[in-house]
Image: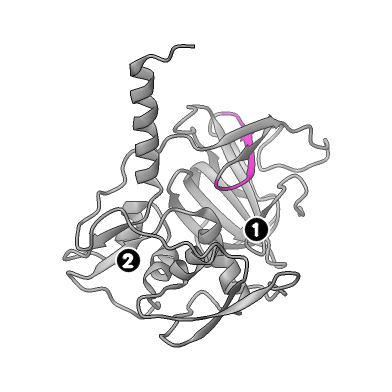
């Protein structure tokens, strides 16, 4: 089959756009900037921004300072915006010791070691405010890829604010025939599996339909996240995180305790498919689990 030059150009363009949208970059701090305002520009969380730059909650950024803008990664966002749950993270996995070097961050070490930030934190019993120091010894998985990474923009260059929607990197699976007794955030949805950077399910819904809480817990994060629109994380008492993405409106805030069945907000319009739907993702110990099998109530 002969492929037209226009299709080739379009494919290459989409690949280039995708790589830029999901690649690390650097940002030079301007007057009036805060970690919060910068995180909003790039549609990531403040916690990710701190982790990528080895900053504590007390650290203040300065004009001219160059910050790493990490790749939007929902797994990392969930781990960094939840209360740590002590688990035997190294069980059945060989580990080795890594000595922290100048310029290292939790984010950078995790990438070099082929781990998620959540895995690195759990393995070393770090919490969300951990700041590593040169010479400190940390555990990493022995089977990590140890691939060095580089950023796409030169140091000191001001990166462009994220305003457009990225290409759809989701891979859609089959419709799930969930048990009729399964409680979902919306009524009678068509449930479609979604794979890609994060696994979950996509739920069809009515326009502006109410989204309800399927597992009570503390609201850990509310905001706009790159590629997912408005999103909120709720952590149950057992440490499981429920991520509700693609919301049209949200009527809870960080710090609230959401009870089972209470309204969290309304369904939004997916920016790519233009359909009324939300995405539900569930994480345990920093790893995605099947939302249909996750605990309810």
Q: In this rendering, does residue 255 appear at all?
A: no
- Between residues 7 and 126, which one lies in front from this camera angle? 7
Task: Please rate how many residues cluster around mark 1, counting C-alpha atoms within 10 Å: few if below 14, some from 14 to 19, many from 20.
Answer: some
Position of residue 183 measured from the top left corner of the image (x, y, whole percent): 75, 43
The quadrant of the image that shows the C terminus is bottom right
Which residue is tagged 2?
35
Q: In the image, 294: left or right of 143?
A: right
Element type at mark 1:
strand
The one of 236 and 160 positioned closer to us in this rendering: 160
Q: Residue at the location (44% across, 53% down)? A: 72
Seen at 64% across and 75% down, the residue is: 95
Q: Which residues are magenta?
A: 197-206
Please name whichever residue, 60 or 249, is drawn nearer the observer in this view of the structure: 60
Image vertical order of residue 149 relative to residue 173, above or below: below
Res 287 label = 1
Horizontal and vertical percent for residue 275?
52, 27
């Amino acid at each position: 089959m002969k492929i037209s030059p226009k299709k080739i150009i379009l494919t290459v363009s989409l690949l280039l756009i995708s790589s830029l949208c999901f690649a690390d970059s650097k940002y030079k701090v301007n007057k009036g900037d805060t970690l919060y305002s910068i995180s909003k520009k790039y549609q990531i969380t403040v916690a990710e921004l701190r982790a990528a730059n080895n900053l504590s909650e007390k650290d203040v950024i300065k004009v001219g300072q160059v910050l790493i803008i990490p790749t939007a990664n929902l797994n990392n966002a969930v781990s960094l915006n939840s209360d740590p749950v002590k688990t035997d993270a190294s069980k059945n996995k060989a580990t080795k010791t890594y000595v922290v070097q100048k310029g290292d961050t939790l984010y950078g070490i995790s990438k070099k070691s082929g781990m998620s930030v959540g895995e690195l934190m759990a393995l070393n019993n770090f919490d969300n405010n951990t700041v590593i120091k040169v010479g400190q010894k940390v555990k990493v998985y022995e089977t990590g890829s140890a691939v060095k990474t580089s950023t796409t923009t030169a140091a000191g260059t001001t990166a462009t604010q994220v305003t457009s929607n990225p290409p759809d990197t989701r891979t859609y699976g089959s419709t799930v025939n969930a048990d009729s007794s399964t409680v979902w955030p919306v009524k009678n949805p068509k449930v479609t599996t979604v794979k890609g950077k994060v696994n979950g399910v996509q739920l069809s819904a009515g326009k502006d339909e109410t989204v309800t809480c399927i597992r009570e817990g503390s609201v850990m994060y509310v905001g706009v996240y790159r590629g997912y629109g408005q999103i909120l994380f709720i952590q149950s008492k057992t440490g499981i995180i429920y991520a509700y993405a693609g919301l049209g409106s949200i009527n809870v805030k960080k710090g609230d305790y959401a009870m089972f069945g209470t309204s969290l907000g309304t369904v939004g319009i997916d920016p790519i498919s233009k359909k009324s739907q939300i995405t539900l993702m569930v994480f345990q110990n920093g790893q995605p689990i099947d939302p249909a099998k996750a605990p309810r109530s």
